[in-house]
Image (tube, rainbow, N blue to C red):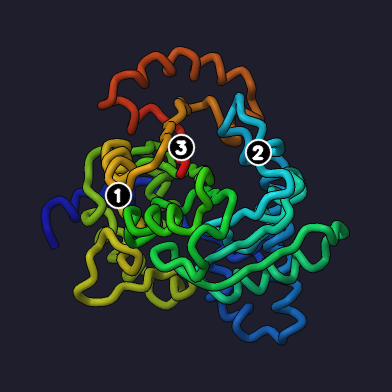
């Protein structure tokens, strides 16, 4: 164990935390728990449906549109064919589709249970004018033809993909000429939860002081020390995997503003916008306590300084046009 990993683990354990398995509030890791695995098919369906239902209302409370002030996504996407890249259980996909009145809503994610949840929930909606299509797949190899979609949107997914560059290239390939990619995801240096360490610690800003590899190794070793109790939220790590890739540790690829700009410039788009989203300007806190937006107004001018964007932005918010 390196000295850096030791220090990181000490800080993680200073404010330790553990996830609670709650069948009434399903999360991604729920599908790995023995209660889900041992449940009969009807019980599994109920759990998956509840997962999607809660995800639907999460978007109703904190709509994706919130990140794009000044843009009417309904006007842009009404009657269009769109893809939710990283749709998880599909609840938000349905919320988007209904709010924007799209013609066809596609969704893709990496796990078949998430897709089952999306199919279950979408098939029970009253609006039958919207066509849904959910499938298992990866962003680096989208299973769609060239020029398929009018728009692609992605929320808190790009930080998890194995290759941001290949995923964006696939988005460009499957978008029609003039099609738009709307993406929202945390920079590696986002101070509050961007590293997905909440299963083991409540200590913020560790990513300001440690690289992704160090945090991944420390996270994995703490999980291993918990033994069998952590089986359902344990990382799936393969020997020899790059710790910044999908299979490693907490699955964070470490993308920053600078890296993202470099990628979109290399891939090439007719237009590319990165919208300012200072801390406390968007997200749950700004909705529950609107007064905090006054703080975000103070931070916004500082985002002109490139070195501060990773630390003072709530998310990397972008619109890329083919």
Up-down: is 15 above or below 89?
above
Question: Residue 6 at x, y = what percent?
Answer: 18, 54
Mark 2 vs mark 1: give the one in front.
2
- For marks 2 and 1, the one nearer the N-term is 2
- Nearer to me, 114 or 44: 114
Q: What element carries label 1?
A: loop
Which residue does the numbered mark 1 point to in the structure image?
A: 254
Mark 2 vs mark 3: give the one in front.
2
What residue is drawn where x is 22% and y is 48%? 211
- Distance from disc 2 to disc 3, alpha carbons, whole Å, reads 15 Å
Left or right position of 123 against 119: right
User: Are the residues at dot 2 and dot 1 in contact (C-beta closer than 8 Å)?
Assistant: no
| Quadrant of res 122 | bottom right
Outermost residue toward the right in this view: 126
The label shown at residue 76 is 2
The label shown at residue 318 is 3
Question: Residue 51 at x, y = what percent?
Answer: 68, 63
What residue is drawn where x is 72% and y is 44%? 78
- Distance from disc 3 to disc 1, alpha carbons, whole Å, reads 17 Å
- For marks 2 and 3, the one nearer the N-term is 2
Outermost residue toward the front in this view: 177
Question: Residue 313 at x, y = what percent?
Answer: 41, 30
Question: Residue 316 at x, y = what percent?
Answer: 42, 37
Is residue 150 among what the camera can see?
yes
Up-down: is 312 above or below 114?
above
Left or right position of 89 against 229: right
The label shown at residue 85 is none
- Distance from disc 2 to disc 1, alpha carbons, whole Å, reads 31 Å
- For marks 3 and 1, the one nearer the N-term is 1
């Amino acid at each position: 164990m390196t000295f850096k990993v030791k220090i990181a683990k000490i800080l993680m354990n200073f404010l330790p935390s553990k996830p609670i398995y709650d069948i009434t509030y399903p999360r991604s890791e729920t599908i790995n728990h023995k209660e889900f695995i041992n449940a009969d098919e009807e019980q599994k369906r109920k759990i998956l449906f509840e997962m999607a239902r809660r995800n639907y209302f999460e978007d109703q409370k904190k709509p994706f549109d919130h990140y794009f002030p000044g843009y009417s996504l309904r006007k842009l996407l009404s009657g269009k064919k769109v893809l939710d890249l990283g749709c998880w259980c599909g609840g938000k996909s349905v919320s988007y589709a209904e709010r924007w009145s799209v013609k066809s809503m596609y969704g893709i994610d990496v796990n078949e249970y998430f897709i089952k949840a999306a199919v279950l929930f979408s098939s029970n909606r009253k609006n039958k004018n919207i066509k849904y299509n959910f499938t298992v797949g990866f962003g680096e190899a989208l299973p769609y033809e060239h020029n398929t979609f009018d728009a692609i949107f992605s929320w808190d997914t790009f930080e998890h993909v194995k290759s941001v560059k290949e995923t964006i290239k696939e988005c460009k390939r499957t978008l029609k000429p003039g099609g738009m990619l709307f993406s929202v995801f945390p920079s590696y240096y986002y101070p509050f939860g961007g590293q997905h360490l909440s299963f083991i610690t409540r200590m913020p800003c560790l990513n300001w002081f440690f690289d992704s590899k160090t945090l991944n190794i420390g996270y994995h070793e703490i999980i291993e020390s918990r033994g069998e109790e952590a089986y359902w939220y344990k990382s799936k790590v393969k020997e020899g995997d790059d710790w910044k890739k999908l299979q490693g540790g907490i699955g964070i690829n470490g993308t920053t503003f600078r890296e993202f700009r470099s990628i979109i410039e290399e891939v090439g788009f007719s237009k590319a916008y990165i919208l300012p989203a200072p801390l406390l300007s968007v997200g749950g806190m700004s909705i529950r306590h609107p007064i905090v937006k006054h703080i975000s107004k103070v931070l916004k001018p500082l985002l002109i300084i490139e070195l501060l964007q990773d630390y003072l932005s709530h998310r990397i918010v972008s619109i890329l046009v083919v």
